[in-house]
Amino acid sequence: MSGAKERLQLQEKFEIMPETLGGQFRKDFPPYLDGLVRSEPHHYVTTPEFAKNAEDIYNLAPRPDDIYVSTFPKCGTTWVQELVWMVVNQCDFEKSKKEQLSIRSPFLEKANSPLVDKIMELICYWNLMDWLRPFIRKAISFVLGDCLRDLEQIDQMAGPRVIKSHLPLYLLNPSVLNTSKVVYVARNPKDVIVSYYHYHRLLEFHHYTGNLEAFADYFMTDRVYSAPFFPHLLDAWNKRHHPNLHFVFYEDLKKDLRGEIQKIAKFLGKTLTEDQLVKLTEHLRFDNFAKNETVNCEIGKEIGLMNNSGNFIRKGKTGDWKNHFSPELNERIDKWMQTNLEGTDLRFITELEQQD
Ligand code: A3P
């Protein structure tokens, strides 16, 4: 992947989490047939499929014109991914209307993952007839197309590449930050928990069957995909003064989308005309975004990856957690946040400011 260069060895080692192979966990996450794995020394939680490919991904050579959109899941990745793609592509609304975002901007850790095989595994799990499977496989490949591209294809993709990743920075190629640009998006963990809970119910890959309270516990005890939350965030927070890293809060995007677009454009060395800025701000507003078929993943419902219980672009609010948490759960989350933020200067926007 890195041409003639020597292959880098990933120091992170993944081990199966035995508690994810049975008991209540298996009941709450029925599709996790092989459980989840956790890495040492950083305790990153992921799927066994990803673990197999982690070192290949680590070896993907970064380029000076790459932009990584890096986030913990549910922090506004898709929103900022479209924003960044637009800024670096002269606000090409025509192309953005025609082509799925997942094709224009690849999802790094989904590359090389046997996605189709996983879908097929689920189809077997739901007992679909054998003779149907080849047709379904064809249909999935047809609909998802390039979105299933492997690392080789990402490596050869024409630049500038806008690469989406939920990986913590230490799982990306170590020269990413000194070579490419990184836009890191952070969000208040309370809203992330609510958003991630709904997402785990929506996606057939996760098919979470438990309640929000139990999910919040899985989240705080680092037993969900992409956990742990705080080290992911704090690693980027501590690097926020690096000239190649732009750190943005979801809550600030909500408060002043136009202003944050301008900051990101400046960071990327781009200037937008007033007309482009007005149109892009409109394009990215929640109501328009939720209806936009190249970003809202509604296609996932047609091919059985998502059920009909909700939407991928769901509510888009700050402070939605207030409609979900009991006082007791909120108190526990507050304590968890306090413990994890101790000794750091990272603060989330106060509750009062969070009212949407
Ligand atoms: P909610 O579930 O709270 O609504 P990601 O892309 O990282 O998966 O993040 C998804 C979250 O971002 C969802 O949060 C989604 O609704 C929100 N989101 C997506 N587009 C948005 C937009 N244009 N404005 C505000 N929030 C948006």
Image (spheres, rainbow, N blue to C red):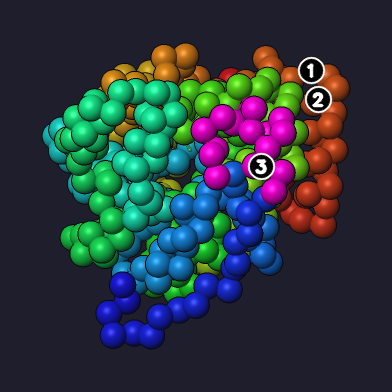
Q: Which residue is mark 2?
A: 329
- Marks 1 and 2: CB-CB under 8 Å? yes
| 45 part of magenta stretch | no
Q: Position of residue 136 (x, y in %)?
A: 24, 29
Magenta span of residues:
18-34
User: Is residue 142 among the parts visible in the rendering?
Assistant: yes
Q: Percent from the top left, x then y, of residue 47? A: 53, 49
Left or right: 276 as drawn, with respect to 228: left
Per the image, label 1 sits on a secondary structure element best described as: loop
Residue displayed at 45% across by 74% down: 175
Q: Is residue 29 magenta?
A: yes
Measure the alpha-carbon separation of dots 1 and 2. 5 Å
User: Element at badge 3?
Assistant: helix
Q: Nearer the viewer, mark 1 or mark 3?
A: 3
In this view, the residue in front, 88 or 60, is 60
Residue 111 vs residue 341: left or right?
Answer: left
Work out whether 36 lies above or below 276: below
Residue appearing at x 63%, y 54% in the figure: 16
Answer above or below: position of 208 versus 90.
above
Q: Nearer the viewer, mark 3 or mark 2?
A: 3
Q: Residues within 10 Å of mark 1 (few under 14, many from 20)?
A: few
Task: Look at the image and tell me whether residue 283 can be seen.
Answer: no
Q: Report the residue marked by disc 1.
A: 326
Earlier residue among tags 1 and 3: 3
Label 2 SS: helix
Q: Which residue is mark 3?
A: 20
User: Where residue 104 sits in the image (x, y, percent)?
Assistant: 24, 45
Neighbor class of circle 3 (other Cα within 10 Å; few <14, some 14-19, many 20+) is many
Please identify the quadrant where the N terminus is shown.
bottom left
Depth order, front residue of 233/242: 233
Q: Amino acid at mark 2?
A: Leu
